[in-house]
């Protein structure tokens, strides 16, 4: 996931870049509005924009108006203006959230994650109710998982949630934190160990049901995925 950071203050841009990298995202930096639009055009896989309002060349409000002509990418506006009307104006223009300077970088990251979850959940609504992944048929509506011969695989609600998340995004690697936030729908500093236990149980059940077919794969040091050729 690429995150575009737009701020003419190089120190703030570099600070956010560090935090974005630490959370496993790929930062893309722009120092004015025109450069931001150029970066968006050349990086179609940017998943979120952190956008300062007061900038040279083209201010943040103008950038939002231009972006919103054809791009629904989530936008978090950052501004030194803390007045209620300034926030309202930013949101009316088309931003998804608004934070004021000086800010705590941890708060900015929390808002980024919340916007990404909201955006990704909206995309998931278009995923078919029934998924055929390798030897498995996964029915979201009935919470049933069946093998090629029609046998049902008995999973807990959390195990099903993990499987459906991975199966609905084939070949995409999800970190333990990503899985915890998307399936448990909360944040936790102990999420990695919790997810590891549930993935292990899920994998054991799937391996037994499919005769050793390793449906869920581990990408060491990164996370988990279901690979589809």
Image: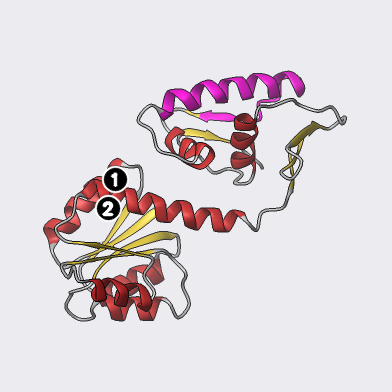
Display colour scheme: secondary structure
The residue most toward the front is 84
Label 2 CA crowd tier, 10 Å (few <14, some 14–19, many 20+): many
**Residue 108: x %, y % from top left:** 27, 52
Q: Residue at x 36, y 47 (%)?
A: 25
Magenta span: predominant SS is helix
Q: Residue at x 63, y 23 (%)?
A: 203
**Residue 172: x %, y % from top left:** 54, 44
Q: Disc 2 or 1, which lies upstream in sequence? A: 1
Whether the magenta-drawn stretch holds residue 190 is answered as: no
Q: Quadrant of residue 34?
A: bottom left
Q: For mark 1, give the secondary structure.
A: helix
**Residue 60: x %, y % from top left:** 26, 75
Q: Which residue is mark 1?
A: 21
Residues rendered magenta in the picture: 191-218
Q: Is residue 149 left or right of residue 203?
A: right
Q: Which residue is mark 2?
A: 108
Q: Is residue 169 left or right of residue 15?
A: right
Label 1 CA crowd tier, 10 Å (few <14, some 14–19, many 20+): few
Query: Looking at the image, which is closer to me, 85 or 79?
Result: 85
CA gap between label 2 and label 1 equals 13 Å
């Amino acid at each position: 996931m690429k995150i575009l950071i737009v701020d003419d203050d190089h120190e703030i841009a570099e600070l956010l870049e560090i935090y974005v990298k630490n959370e496993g995202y790929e930062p893309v930096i722009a120092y004015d509005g025109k450069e931001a639009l150029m970066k968006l055009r050349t990086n179609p896989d940017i998943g979120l924009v952190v956008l300062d309002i007061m900038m040279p060349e083209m201010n943040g409000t103008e950038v939002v108006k231009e972006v919103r002509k054809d791009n629904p990418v989530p936008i978090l506006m950052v501004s030194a203006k803390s007045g209620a009307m300034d926030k309202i104006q930013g949101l009316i223009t088309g931003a998804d959230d608004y934070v004021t300077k000086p800010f705590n970088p941890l708060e900015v990251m929390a808002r980024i994650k919340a916007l990404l979850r909201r955006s990704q959940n909206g995309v998931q609504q278009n995923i078919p109710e029934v998924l055929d992944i390798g030897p498995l048929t996964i029915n979201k509506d009935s919470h049933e998982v069946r093998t090629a011969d029609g046998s049902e695989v008995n999973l807990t609600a959390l195990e099903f949630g993990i499987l459906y998340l991975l199966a609905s995004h084939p070949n995409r690697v999800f970190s333990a934190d990503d899985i915890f936030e998307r399936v448990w729908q909360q944040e936790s500093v102990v999420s990695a160990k919790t997810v590891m236990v549930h993935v292990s149980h899920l994998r054991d059940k799937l391996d037994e049901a499919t005769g050793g077919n390793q449906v869920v794969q581990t990408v060491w040091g990164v996370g988990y995925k279901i690979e589809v050729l």
